[in-house]
Amino acid sequence: MTGWAAVTAVSFALAAIAAPASAAPTDAQAVQGLAQRYYRAVYAASPTSATDAGLHTADGRLADFSRSGYAAYGVQLKAFRDELAALAPGGTSVHDQVDYLLLRADIEGDWWQRTYLRARERNPSIYESECSNGVFSLLKKSFAPNVVRARDVTLRLRACRGVLRAAKANLTDVVREFAVVASQDVAGGDALYTESLAALAIGIPARDKRALFAARDDALSALHEFKHWVDRMTPSWHAGGFAVGEAQYDFYLRRVLLLPYTAQDLGRIARVELARDRALEAWEAQRERYEGAVSKQPSFANKAQFLAYYEAQTARLRAFVTSRHLVTLPSYLGPFKIVEVPAALAPIYPGGFMNPPGPFDSDHTGFYFVPDYDPKNTGFFATQARQAVLPVLAHEGVPGHFLQFSIANHNPDFVRRMHDDGVFAEGWAFYGEEMLMRSGLYEDDPAGRREVIHLMRHRATRVGVDVGLASGTMTLPQAIAYFQANAGIDRGTAYGEGTRFAMGPGQAIDYLAGKTQVETLLADYLDHYGSSARLGAFHDRLLSYGTVPYATIAWEWFGDAQWIQRVRNPIEPASFGAS
């Protein structure tokens, strides 16, 4: 990788912030230079994110949650924001203007979360997850020998107590529901330290092993003390109060996500989609009643067989998308490995999760951490994973996230490689689920079709919950009940989803908002290219832009600026300038 990759060979100490650029407002190089400095600062402030991205310059540190550290980053962020504002794109090319908007979206999102979500003061989960994610990021991929990673894990474990000490000083406006989640996560998290860490101890010197286990014991002690403190304080903390309000939510949708929809638009889209999905369920039931088809799902004697079967099915997916010319698989695409979610992280990731290669990784391997294969686990996501394998593999692997991120990592434009738009990522993967179904992947697999349709219904319900919680028109109990009634999921899953979306508004909409835009762009493509249009060519071109908002793709590809005009300069709420 060129350009920014060179930073891996030098210290990650931040360079002094330059004064606002004196170059012309159309100077694309100034935007690129600012982007280099901004993303460097982001990774310096979040060492765990740097590790996940394939930057291994701060693997022995955790984030600095001290008041001085928080203030110092705030000064940098304000300087970056002011500098970019002075670089209004003016009459530059569409490509350069898009780069400007992408960088602005990232900086504004950073600022918005700091100003309005205020997780540092309101959410105890961010502190315990800094410890667990900091450790797990060094465990899940063997990017260095055990002795190297064990020493870095030891340093991060030693830093955990300081993170939790800072939490007690910072948590001045805690949301009670978030405190309950933090306590639950700590209670179920010991296995990460007592079981998963054991793999790193293999083959390392005895002195390093003693240091590792001593640091582990101290981190666990600190986490348990933190849980007791949270439990003791929880009754005194206020319930609710996590809604940002419709005006702020709309600002986030437009300014940060560059999404051409308001909260009310999203609500209407979700209601129409939910009705459509219920109709699809009825049609599928009618088809099965008369065809009498039965899915031939294999049985597994143990977890190893289950995981091996999962991985073997990735070859089937690759063959299907290639033979049907649905998308081109690049030569640099690496293997896609299947591993089980660690027991300690299962409550946090009940549906499993995908770990793609990072933008700075030399190893192109991707991983899907699949939920535990246990027939006694009746949670929604675990049941789905047992019912049919291909839908989740298509979403997480090929042609979904793994393929999409792998391609984005090779984008020649630095800003495009750095920008990580959730609406694009989840929208593409969600679109692929139904696209593969319509293309014939599940002709002999009614369980697969049922799963795809049920997930469509689930994603539509997520939008209603996200909009309701963020705007303040729905309480958390109401959100949980809405999930159960409309998504067809169990209460435990509904509770987990509801609390997660209350903590981070704007993520649950990604799937349906993105899919809706992909389908709109496909219609534009068909109109534009006529008889020469090919679905595979559309998919290849779409993925070539990187993980970016669809509004920018419509502008760059088709010259259609309608979406981008809706988001370019949204009205800024009066209080947004607060730090």
Image (cartoon, grey):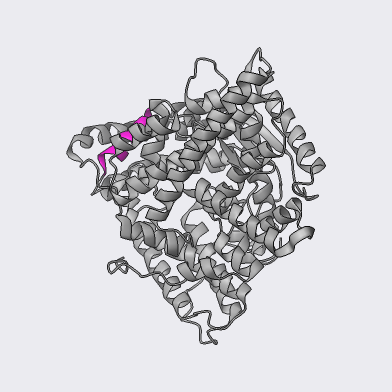
Q: How many numbered circles does the render carry?
A: 0
Q: Which residues are magenta?
A: 175-187
Residue displayed at 45% across by 71% down: 80
Residue 378 shows up from this direction: yes
Q: Position of residue 208 (x, y in %)?
A: 56, 35
Q: Is residue 466 above or below residue 452?
A: below
Residue farthest to the top, as pictured: 301
Could you tell whether 178 is left or right of 496 in the image? Answer: left
Q: Position of residue 451 (x, y in %)?
A: 58, 29
Residue 507 shows up from this direction: no
Quadrant of image for the N terminus: bottom right
Q: Position of residue 548 (x, y in %)?
A: 58, 59
Quarter where residue 235 is shown: top left
Could you tell whether 518 is left or right of 46 in the image? Answer: right
Residue 424 belongs to the span the image colors magenta:
no
Residue displayed at 73% across by 55% down: 540
Residue displayed at 56% across by 47% down: 426
Quarter where residue 185 is shown: top left
Quarter where residue 491 is shown: top left
Determine the main secondary structure of the stretch shown in magenta. helix
Residue displayed at 50% across by 80% down: 87
Q: Position of residue 554 (x, y in %)?
A: 60, 64
Residue farthest to the left, as pictured: 236
Residue 182 belongs to the span the image colors magenta:
yes
Quadrant of image for the C terminus: bottom left
Could you tell whether 417 is left or right of 116 in the image? Answer: right
